[in-house]
Amino acid sequence: MANANAINPETGKQYKSVRRSRFIGSIFATAFFALLSAILIYPLFCGFIASFRPGRELIRRGLALNLDSSGMSLNNYKYLFSGNADSIKYWNWFKNSMILTLVTVALTLIVCYFVAYGITMYKFKLQKVLFMLVIATMMVPFEILLMPLYQEMIDINLIDSMWGVILPGLCSASTIFFFHQYMISLPAELLDAGRIDGANEYYISVKIMMPITKPAFSSMAILCAMGAWNNMLWPLMVFRSADKFTLTIGLNTLLTPYGNNYDMLIAGSMLAIVPIMVVFLIFQRYIIDGMTAGAVKG
């Protein structure tokens, strides 16, 4: 009688072949993503090296990977912290960007959460139509909306105001869609259980459902923060006063036909990356959790 635990030679060969194929595939995948990462990191690293060199070197050589330490110093960063007129302007732009980003993220998450909650958790006529209208707005390029939004800000007297930058993007269709996709994976019985216990709708939405959607809040907070921090086109149209400029606008004003302050530009650009990079490194796991938690229903 043949041994029941004996391994079929053909099966063993197939198993080894599959393992070999997976191993080779993993090597190619690792090499591809390593190459892609190097391509993406290269300009950032070149900018970091250039921030320790005089601005005239950037004009002569551009952003090049030159690791010669002879001409490197901290003078550009010292200039930002020196307390002169230019450095004061830079930190004012930095402060404006921080305030704008924090307010935008907080209000966007609150508004979009309740919109998505209403569309997802309640059953009513034209529910799907309303959701499709929200999705349809994602297909409209923002450039098409620039002039109508600009005229609207003029009519309600919000030009050169922080609220003129914040309000038009407060109800983001992409954020609503993300919350909706996350919420449809949550059991509807949670609402019924809350109502049976005598909780009102506000308590259910804030005390029961909102804590469950923490991964969605965390991941969307990072994405919204990145968008608000890097936004330039709309703030450039709204703001008029130099003391209200954000970092993206302020750094752009350093390049003029009459002179270019590359020393402050390159060092200031590197420092501008730090807040978003720190936030991303700390909360990157929430992005993955939030993206995948609503991927499978049930």
Image (spheres, rainbow, N blue to C red):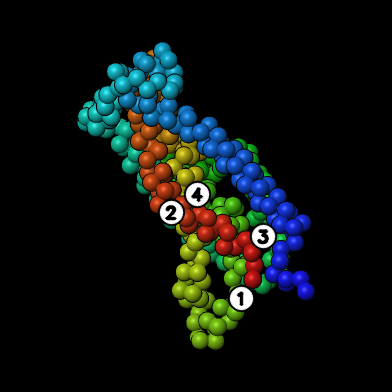
Query: Which tag, 4 or 1, sits closer to the chain's start?
Result: 1
Quadrant of the image containing the C terminus:
bottom right
Tell me whether circle 2 and circle 3 mark residues in contact (CB < 8 Å). Answer: no
Q: Nearer the viewer, residue 4 or 11?
A: 4
Query: Which tag, 2 or 3, sits closer to the chain's start?
Result: 3
At label 2, the amino acid type is Phe
Tell me whether circle 4 and circle 1 mark residues in contact (CB < 8 Å). Answer: no
SS under mark 4? helix
At label 4, the amino acid type is Leu
Q: How many marks?
A: 4
Q: Which mark is residue 164?
A: none
SS under mark 2? helix
Pointer 3 local density, CA inside 10 Å: few below 14, some 14–19, many at least 20? some
Tell us which disc is closer to us: 4 or 3: 4
**Cα–Cα span, label 4 and label 1:** 27 Å
Vertical position of residue 237 compared to residue 276: above or below = above
Tell me whether circle 4 and circle 3 mark residues in contact (CB < 8 Å). Answer: no
Q: Which mark is residue 283?
A: 2
At label 3, the amino acid type is Phe
Disc 3 target residue: 131
- Report whether residue 150 is seen: yes
Query: Which tag, 2 or 1, sits closer to the chain's start?
Result: 1
Query: Which tag, 4 or 3, sits closer to the chain's start?
Result: 3
Tell us which disc is closer to us: 2 or 1: 2
